[in-house]
Amino acid sequence: MSKKTHFIHLGLKDYKETWDYQEKLFKETVDLKIQNRKLSEDSQIGTKNYLIFCEHPHVYTLGKSGDENHLLANDAFLKEKKATFYKINRGGDITYHGPGQIVGYPILDLDHFFTDIHKYLRFLEEAVILTLNDYGIKSGRVEGLTGVWLDGDNNAKARKICALGVKSSRWVTMHGFAFNVNTNLEYFNYIIPCGIQDKAVTSLQKELGYELNIREVEEKLKNHLAAVFEMDLVE
């Protein structure tokens, strides 16, 4: 078992290119685990863990259990807004990615950490909660829903600041989270975010009233993820 995790920052990267890159790393890890089952313990090759950060150009993604009717824009409107749309293989419904948002894709072999997807999601949320706390913002969870919320105990005020959607196979994860930092929230008006009609979406910039240094926020979030998962993070 190794908690060594390779940190990769892709910058502003096309969604499909990033998805293909994730799939490559994910498949390599899963295939290696299958191969290792046929070998003696002494002959097995250790799997790697990755934590990818990036931003995407404007894009909407729909999870495999999502409802396409939750996209409220047609192709012409998407083109006008310079946005693309993909149906993908993660859990969850529809969400938006765009500049000013930290998108994180942990590709972890959970056999190195713990084999519990519920706990995995809670740990991702916890790292975001701790990052928000660094900026004096109290956040938490809403029972029965994933993600990180502000005023989650008040239905009239509840607003989501970080969405989660993951896939796992043989305890290897992919996809991940989207944390709104300096995100243009207008783009959420053209979907029913995560299929939830009665709750709003927010960003760190909106809550604080000023634009953040996104690299500074990334550094704090990266360090919290490393601490929560007890990762040995390497650049």
Image (cartoon, rainbow, N blue to C red):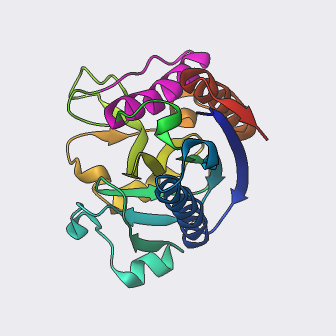
Q: Is residue 232 visible?
A: yes
Quadrant including the N terminus: top right
Closer to the camera in the image, 4 or 11: 4
Q: Is residue 181 above or below residue 22?
A: above
Residue extending farthest bottom: 76
Please state the total of marks drawn on the protein image: 0
- Residue 80 point in image, percent of width and height: 49, 79
Quadrant including the C terminus: top right
Closer to the camera in the image, 188 or 11: 11
Closer to the camera in the image, 157 or 234: 234
Tell me the residue at 27%/27% (across/down). Answer: 142
The range drawn in magenta is 117-141
Task: Report the side of 150 relative to 142 (left or right).
Answer: right
Q: Is residue 235 above or below residue 97?
A: above
Tell me the residue at 47%/45% (across/down). Answer: 177
Tell me the residue at 51%/29% (across/down). Answer: 128
Q: Is residue 225 magenta?
A: no
Q: Is residue 50 visible?
A: no
- Residue 116 point in image, percent of width and height: 35, 33
Q: What secondary structure prevails in the magenta region?
A: helix
Closer to the camera in the image, 91 or 12: 91
Residue extending farthest right: 235
- Residue 155 point in image, percent of width and height: 20, 28
- Residue 31 point in image, percent of width and height: 51, 62
Task: Report the side of 125 relative to 228 (left or right).
Answer: left
Q: Is residue 124 magenta?
A: yes
Tell me the residue at 38%/83% (across/down). Answer: 75
- Which quarter of the figure has residue 65? bottom left
